[in-house]
Image: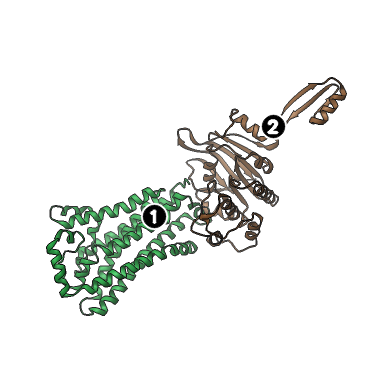
Amino acid sequence: MSVIEISHLTRDYGSGKGIFDVTFQVNEGEVFGFLGPNGAGKTTTIRHLIGFIRNKAGQCTINGLDCWRDSAKIHQSLGYIPGEISFFDDMTGTDYLKFVSKYKGIAESGRQKELIERFELNPEGKIRKMSKGMKQKLGIVTAFMNDPDILILDEPTSGLDPLMQNRFIELIADEKNKGKTVLLSSHIFEEVERTCDRIGIIKDGKLVTVDSVETLRERHMRTYTVSLNTPEEASEFAKDFGGTASGVNVTVASKLSLESIFMDYYGGGHNDQ
Amino acid sequence: MINSTLYLREMKKSWKMLLIFAAVLTMYVSIIIAMYDPEMMKTLDTFNQIMPEMMAAFGMNGMATSLLGFMVSYLYGFILLIFPMVFSILRGNGLIAKYTENGAIWVLTAAPVRRMKIVCTQLAVLLSGVFLLMIYTTVLELIVAGSQFPDEFEVKQLLALNSGLISLQMFIAGICFLSSCIFSDTKYSMAFGAGIPAFMYVLKMLANVGEKTEAAKYFSFFTLFDGNALIAGETSAIVCTIVLFAGAVVMYVLGCVIFCRKDMAL
């Protein structure tokens, strides 16, 4: 059963910017990776889901509820981390967490404390003076603290150090085990590869492909057959490079990393553009 | 209709500003009422003779004979118009446009709280501030004037005067609120929220100066607040007060609807 459904969603900002005819679903209990370079339309798509932008053409629903009209209802069981995070700067982290809990009507549970410890967040002190990473952690705690069923995360690990990125990936794995539905946008291939079941790649506002991580890899797997001088050498070679030997011939396959797959879709460019 | 958590947070932010404005108003209101003194009136008359245009521009036309007339000239021409107006401008901008600009609005909208409730809460905060200032001013006037000149004014007239002022301030708050809802940029929210009332006030000043520029009053909503006519209980003044009030309500509704339909491009 699909929890998040986007069909033919279009928002044209002019001069080629925006999103065009984006269609995909995220099923219950699935972690869906939403991959694309900066400015490809990830955030625009997500803003529709969160109810920040009204859908002009196409539909987007969460649990069958319209993302614009029923936004308040959807947010009862939704956790969200924005791509560009900002808070009420004048508050301390502790005050902010208290405020959000009361504002959203979340009952006090040990969950918040557990998340604070997990990410080594120090919520004391004014948010204005917090580092980018600390703010990101605060955003993570806010999104997960009411234990929502659906998580929409827009580049959630930006600003985190590698250790914290790992902890975040573990957190996603835990949530997945609990049966949560996750939409995770990213341009970090590793985190998507490690956490997601299926991946949608978006380019210039158009969805290029939606597939499972495995299928994507297989589709882009290349095999080579090399001939060596002796069968002994061949079997050694096969052992070292994980190929299969038959006589003097060895067949090796190279699994492309998601990054290379990604670059295929972007015409071999090296940068974010 | 409102979210109490958000309301309390925002009132906490208004609090300091309200205290400062209340202090300033206390000073002016008590000094000016204390200045009501036949002897002092002569001094002010001298000012009027020396620089009548300057005094008239600020609404101090020296026509005052009664205490309330004196207050209309010296309090309701500048101080009681400008200070609550500055409060509305600053808070109006800070309650919505500032959050939309710096992106913190997501904290409020990405939550199980309807946009209508959010915007109504912010409006309630703005109006609470305006009402608190107005109520404080009224109580202060009643105390100061009542203790010094208990026989020189009628409470009913003062209340009529202040209800007109409240309507005017609600109208100004409406302009600030509406522009805060429309614009996602504090630059523009401020340009309209502060610019329109300030420009209108300048027009009023121009109209006060002399006959040549009197026509300017037809272009300023400040003309709808006529202190002397309110004291006299003239029907036209009551109509003007109702017009201001209705205009304010229209702007509140419009602001709320616009906020609810707006794209939050953070």
Q: Which of B121 and B150 is in front in this view?
A: B150
Q: How many marks?
A: 2
Provide residue A123's location: percent of width, then percent of height.
58, 59
State the residue position of label 1.
B93
- Asked whether, in this view, residue B17 is left or right of residue A253, the answer is left
Question: In this orientation, which residue lies closer to the viewer: B167 or A230?
Answer: A230
Q: In this view, does B258 lie above or below A11?
A: below
Q: Where is residue B113 in the image (x, y as percent from the top left)?
A: 51, 57
> Amino acid under label 1?
Asn
Chain B: what color? Answer: green
Residue A234 image-quadrant placement: top right
Chain (brown): A
Q: What element carries label 1?
A: helix
CA gap, disc 2 and disc 1 = 52 Å
- What chain letter is assigned to the residue under label 1? B
Regarding residue B220, the answer to whether it shows in the image is no
Which colouring convention does the figure follow? by chain
Q: Name the residue under label 2.
A: A256
Residue A185 circle label: none
